[in-house]
Image (cartoon, rainbow, N blue to C red):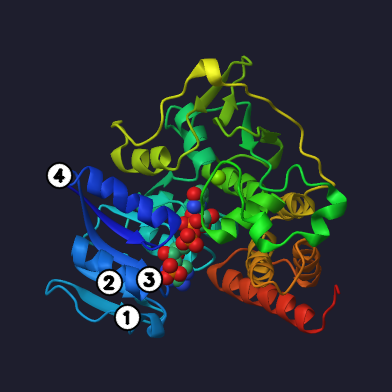
Amino acid sequence: MKKIALLGCTGSIGKQVLQVVERYPDQFKIVSLCCNSNGQLLSEQINKFKPMVAGITNPEGALKIKSLPKQTTLYTGENALLHCVLPEADVIFVAVVGFCGLSAVIQGCKMGKVIALANKEALVAGGEIVMPLAKEHGATIIPVDSEHSAIWQCLGENTNKPFKQILLTASGGALRNTPISELEKVTASDALKHPNWLMGAKITIDCATMMNKGLEVIEAMHLFNCSLDKIKVVIHPQSIIHSMVEYTDNAVIAQLSAPTMDIPIQYALTYPNRKPTSAKQLNFFDLSLTFNQVDTNRYPCFELALAAAKEGGVMPCALSGANEVAVQLFLQGKIKYTQIASYVKFALEKVVNMPVTYQNLVYTDGFARECVMLAFKEKKFD
Ligand code: NDP
Ligand code: MG
């Protein structure tokens, strides 16, 4: 029986992790559940899965939790997340969104755990400290992001295997066919209509701007220990090939499936074994797979991410933090779609690069967020 600590249990990924647990109840047991504010759903999940520990960071959300099974201890407030990184767990499943995942990943590394990692922002900001820490403490990071799971599978689940380059596929997001001149008028609900995937709001907007792909390039650099020039992004609108690895002999290994997170989520838990999932079988006679270059005029956020990746240090952390705030402002209807890139660029210009330490990351993340908020209050880009 594998014991799972699940951080971000009420989100899109978290709920799918619980479906895997329900599919194979004799293989998996939930030992902790944590979310931010959705006390209603957390309460239902606690009563169903009866974890040892539950956590909710927002105390107001906690008011929705009226009763607890006798074996469950509930933590609220900022430290709830870290209370849920339980020593009793075999796997820490990090499915929270945003920078908040970093402290949990660091704690999981220090405990030498297997970390199933969906939260890309943690690696983008802190990969430089997370990866060596995992090595030092014998922790294993299993990628859950579909592209990185695909790359890991193409490497034979061996992240030390030498390769020539990674071909990271991208759908192009919800607005890939919207004329560039019309992007200014795009609303949150337009940008949330992803053609192939159903995901949380923040990542869906990141897919539209392709900030997501930029973050994934940085995530891949850390996970697979490679430089920026070894990663090529390929637009593949059908999202059937989840990524590819090219080897020195020019052989290319790809991983294909219907676009569903069920496979990468479940495989992170069943690895090295495979078990049936809810994924539809591919019918190759129905497929038509196409590939394009990235149109950089359409995706300024992608360019900002590559520039931050090139600069290194705390710049990817600043990029990710500024983007989190800008995306929230856009989702709230407070800024235009095209201003997301303007605010992120503005914050990056203000940040002074520093060596990566946990303190410097926390500082930079906060500073980048503040830059965006101040610029927003001054209506800098209206
Ligand atoms: P959602 O927004 O759907 O869910 C986020 C989860 O994190 C919720 O459970 C939320 O709680 C919780 N959370 C947020 N902040 C905190 C906090 N401070 N403390 C504790 N819990 C917190 O996001 P997704 O599931 O879409 O994405 C999760 C991560 O996985 C992201 O990093 C994303 O980039 C990555 N990812 C997602 C994919 C997808 O298909 N969705 C695909 C690949 C990667 P609450 O509900 O209470 O707010
Ligand atoms: Mg992805």
Cα separation between marks 3 and 1: 18 Å
Marker disc for residue 81: 3
- Name the amino acid, label 2: Ser
The image position of residue 245, as x and y in percent, is 57, 27
Q: Is residue 46 left or right of residue 103?
A: left
- Name the amino acid, label 4: Asp
- Name the amino acid, label 1: Lys
Residue 228 higher or lower than 211, as above or below: above
Q: Is residue 217 visible?
A: yes
Residue 162 higher or lower than 170, as above or below: above
The quarter of the picture where the C terminus appears is bottom right
Q: Quadrant of residue 346?
A: bottom right
Disc 1 vs disc 4: which is toward the camera? 1
Q: Is residue 355 left or right of residue 13?
A: right
Residue 307 higher or lower than 264, as above or below: below
Q: Quadrant of residue 225?
A: top right
Marker disc for residue 26: 4
Residue that carries the numbered disc 2 in the rendered image: 43
Marker disc for residue 64: 1
The image position of residue 302, as x and y in percent, is 73, 50
From the Cβ of disc 3, is ligand 1 less than 8 Å away?
A: yes
Cα separation between marks 1 and 2: 7 Å
Mark 3 or 1, nearer chain start: 1
Disc 3 vs disc 1: which is toward the camera? 1
